[in-house]
Amino acid sequence: MLAWCLYDVGLAAFNTVIVTFVFPVYFAKAIWGDETSGSAAWGFAMGAAGIAVAILSPVVGAIADQQRRVKPFLIFFGSIVAAASAGLWFALPDRSNAIWVLLVVGASAVAFELAFLFYNALLPRLAPPAKLGRLSGWGWSCAYLGGIACLALALVGFVQPQQAWFGLSHDKAEHIRATTLLVAAWYLVFTLPLLLILREGKPALSIGAAARKGMARLRATLREARSEPNLWRFLLASALYRDGLATVFAMGGLYAAGTFGMAFDKVVLLAIGLNIAAGIGAILFAWLDDFLGSKPTVRLSLIGLIATGVPLLLVEDTTMFVVFALALSLFVGPTQAASRSLLVRLSPPERTAELFGLYGLTGRAFTFLGPFSFSLATTATGSQRVGMSVVVAFFVLGWALLETVRVQRSG
């Protein structure tokens, strides 16, 4: 269980530094050269990555279920994340680099999501049903702590000082680009324990046979949707509110820099605070998950996200923006963790990876809409505030559909 949680620590570095807070701001300001249109370009890239994940996640999930192995997939997709992160060191601050940077970031985001799919599928192997909520919450808490530690290291060693570590200069943004190398190293160090400890038998089927059988099982699952409406209502509900969360993750740093004029070091400090708040929320609500249940925990978290998200769209003062952003972050971790444990509770054990694949499919089938909607609205109006308004809409729609879900094991 410790190695499983440490894997989340490794994942967090990529999510916080590359996807959300540091590299997107660098891309918009230094590579693209305009924060508003640069954030729109970033949003389109994240949306395209979401479409790719929507197509691939159920396929690879079904194959993994038939092979009864996840380790090879963790190694393969994790290696892509690490290599792509390191490759972003070569992203010099020039508009001519924008296209290949967006392609690399998009590919690494796809690999990250697929690695996360198989990481999630390990959850029911590690804890009995009565402790699923706690372990899921602890995993998210470790992720936020990992994000805090990596961001703090990036801030102290590279972003903030006049003279960065290893003699890196501010010329050509070496001190910012070095954070991508930090992410690659961090990812490898913290994901390695799980890969070394995890023991799996020989594959039950070859890749080809597993693909054929897995796809047949996936087609059957889709045909059986009418017989499991409860599970599918949850998948759709979670897809909607996860779309809102994905937009926050993809655009949060850009929103802080573009709308409130926050500098690199201030964005990183904000990110550290947000991860602390999210980690606290995940820890507190992990116990609530097992005590009240996953659905009530998700419901309370969504209400909190809506109540804090609306003011974030309206405030003009930077201090108030930070206050409401920290408040919103308290509910991010519980939403993610309780949704993960709720899916496990609703899923037949023998189909966990397949259904996490569908979880990824339904999520990404909608999640690309968030960044796309942000980019379209921002481009049309020239206002990131208008673009971010889609977040609250997805939270409300997801909550409404969640209320139709009955918590009982499907199948």
Image (cartoon, grey):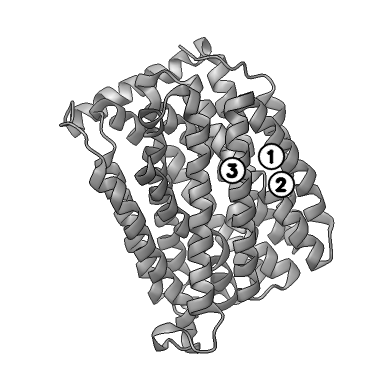
Q: Earlier in the sequence, mark 3 or mark 1?
A: 3
Left or right of 353: which side holds 340?
A: right
The numbered mark at residue 394 is 1
Instruction: Kindly state the secondary structure of the residue where label 3 is placed.
Output: helix
The numbered mark at residue 326 is none
Q: Earlier in the sequence, mark 3 or mark 2?
A: 3
Percent position of residue 87, x then y: 35, 69
Residue in the picture at 36% in, 38% down = 118
Amino acid tagged 1: Phe
Density class for disc 3 (Cα within 10 Å; few <14, some 14-19, many ≥20) is: many
Amino acid tagged 2: Val
Q: Nearer the viewer, mark 3 or mark 2?
A: 3
Amino acid tagged 3: Ala
Against 68, is 221 above or below? above
Residue tagged 2: 390
Q: Quick one: 326 or 62, which is closer to the camera?
A: 326
Image quarter (top left, top right, bottom left or bottom right) of the N terminus:
top left
Residue tagged 3: 282
Against 27, is 224 above or below? above
